[in-house]
Image: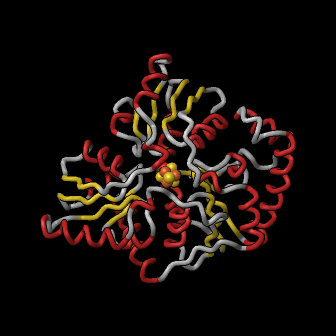
Amino acid sequence: MEPILAGQGKTPEQLYEHLSRLEDPVSYTPESCARFYEQIQEIRRLKRERNAVVLAHNYQRPEIFEVADFIGDSLELARQATQVIADVIVFCGVHFMAETAKILNPEKTVLLPDLRAGCSLADSVDAESLADRKEELRTLYPDLAVVTYVNTTADVKAESDVCCTSSNAVKIVNALPNRHILFVPDENLARYVQQETDKTIISWDGNCYVHHQITPDQIAAVKKNLPHVKILAHPECRADVLGLADAVLSTSGMVRYAKESEASEFLIVTECGLSDRLLLELPEKKFYKVCKLCQYMKMITLGDTLESLRLMRHEITLSEEVRRGAERALRRMFELS
Ligand code: 13P
Ligand code: SF4
């Protein structure tokens, strides 16, 4: 997990210089950066007052990185949530991520700045349907294990044997003694895992609306014009898109790949926030993006983050029974990975 130091102590002018590198003249003007500067100062003061930390997902708005104590992918953030020494966690990400932090930290206050920040993938499965499907399949495959992507609600996790993330899905499936796996809920990630294992993967039929809309034609067009570009794709993309990629990686896996690679130009096939993080962190390299925004991730703003800390809203709560069940599945993931 990487501490974010880049934004600390920037003046409004330095903040503008930094964010204007994204070439988004609507979002980043001298006026908006002056406003962000005020909000950043106030968030930092409130963090000290409340003994709070801010965890942020890689897809968040770049001004939010300026107040984040940690940024990362789902696995890194879940791991980080087990190590937080603070009374309050403000989660700049989507609802299932904040829930994961709460599952692992029942004694802490976990806040999500905007409760509308959901996830189309998490919405594609509910605990009742999963319980029914599990029962039905266990009559056919008595050794069936349910492997659930972290992009799910806590009660779905509680119905599962183990969780996984985009960076460890193959490892988790291969580490289980079971031969038959019900993989929930992402059909694209399930198909990718099937290619990497000799176990039988039975997939749920969910997908992420952001990644599922990316087509191979869009990738092929870039490849045709810029054949030297390295193509990094997220495993939530369709199989025909993944087939064109040089590497299939989680969001932080893409950051590491871009930092370590000798290549200097990349096409980043995932939500646009990740390309923004890369553009700001690796100015000497060039990043092309597919321009897909996750409306849920982008619902979290710096202003809402400030209000969340000021008013201690919106707190994530869970029943203890669900929390314990979900914690069991998450802890098993940590053990197996
Ligand atoms: P990562 O775990 O790779 O960051 O993915 C999370 C996510 O929501 C992708 O859409
Ligand atoms: Fe969910 Fe897709 Fe948004 Fe990730 S990008 S939070 S999977 S809707």
Quarter holding the C terminus? Answer: bottom left
- 92 or 68: which is nearer to us? 92
Q: Residue at x 70, y 48 (%)?
A: 5
Q: Is residue 179 left or right of residue 124?
A: left
Q: Residue at x 41, y 49 (%)?
A: 167
Q: Position of residue 278 (x, y in %)?
A: 60, 37
Residue 327 visible within the image: no
Q: Residue at x 75, y 39 (%)?
A: 19
Residue 247 lies in what quarter of the image?
Answer: top left
Q: Is residue 173 left or right of residue 53?
A: left
Q: Position of residue 314 (x, y in %)?
A: 65, 71
Residue 149 lies in what quarter of the image?
Answer: bottom left
Q: Residue at x 76, y 63 (%)?
A: 306
Vertical placement of residue 297 versus 292, above or below: below
- 14 or 239: which is nearer to us? 239
Vertical placement of residue 82 versus 58, above or below: below
- 195 or 119: which is nearer to us? 119
Vertical placement of residue 282 versus 75, above or below: above
